[in-house]
Amino acid sequence: MTSQNGVSTPAYFKQPIEGADPTVLTDIYLAHTNMVIWKRQLTNPLAQAAKTILAERPKLKTAMIVSPQHTIEALKDALGNTPSVTLLSEDIAQLVEMFCCLFDLEDVGLRLTALDSAMCPRFHVDKVPCRLVTTYHGVASEWIADIDANRNLMGQTDPQSKLIKSTEDIRQLNQGDVALLKGELWQGNEGYGLIHRSPQLVDNSLRLLLTLDFVNN
Ligand SMILES: [Fe+2]
């Protein structure tokens, strides 16, 4: 960090990375990034399964610790053994496997949540090493690149209007995208956590959000 007139600014900006192949996720280890996005389109059956689960369970809130081998079984126990749950669970199990493989973990903290309002409506950084985020249905998370942020204003009382230089700089993930968000607890990423927020939901719409976390930060 450098300091000018008592205001700290980052010495350089972290760059987001994206790609259409899941191997792009390994780029999270690059020091110059704080976000990697695997751009993907959900298959129609998977998108439909997410929609069906949301319709059946609009208040869904599931939190569990799972290993790759037991993810499908654990989700079926929690959500019921339906064709929609099977399809979604198989996809989630693949993401759990990737997350564990990427970070050499035996299990992960999994949250699958139906949202009818913005869970974290203000821009913030997460105090975790790295979080996987994907939206199976509905509008997805908003974020801003380092170069577009006034980081020195993080945590102040009205950060939303000042933290970003322009509302045009707000970027948004798409349904299906799999993003790895580096947080403040990633070694060497202190002060550079990816700035993001939950999107506003309109007209009674719902989101189905999956997050994966390290079990012990
Ligand atoms: Fe967050």
Image (spheres, grey):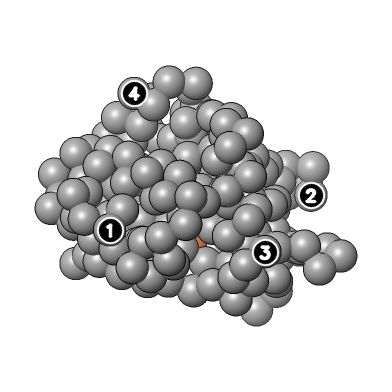
- Against 184, residue 148 (above or below) is above
State yes or no: Cβ of the residue under disc 2 lies below 8 Å from any atom of ligand 1.
no
Question: The residue tagged with tag 2: helix, strand or loop?
Answer: helix
Q: Which residue is mark 1?
A: 73
* Residue found 65% across the figure and 53% down from its top: 51
Q: Amino acid at mark 4?
A: Thr
* Residue found 44% across the figure and 67% down from its top: 79
Q: Are marks 3 and 4 in contact (CB under 8 Å)?
A: no
Per the model, the C-alpha gap separating discs 4 and 1 is 26 Å
State yes or no: Cβ of the residue under disc 1 lies below 8 Å from any atom of ligand 1.
no
Residue 94 left/right relative to 148: left
Q: Position of residue 110 (x, y in %)?
A: 35, 62
Quarter-of-image position of residue 172: top right
Single out the residue that lies furthest toward the front: 82
Per the model, the C-alpha gap separating discs 1 and 2 is 43 Å
Residue sitting nearer the eye, 198 or 70: 70
- Nearer to us of marks 3 and 2 is 3
Q: Amino acid at mark 2?
A: Thr
Residue sitting nearer the eye, 156 or 100: 100
State yes or no: Cβ of the residue under disc 3 lies below 8 Å from any atom of ligand 1.
no
Q: Which residue is mark 4?
A: 23
Residue 123 left/right relative to 80: right
Question: The residue tagged with tag 4: helix, strand or loop?
Answer: helix
Q: Position of residue 87 (x, y in %)?
A: 45, 45
- N-terminal of the pair, mark 2 or mark 4, is 4
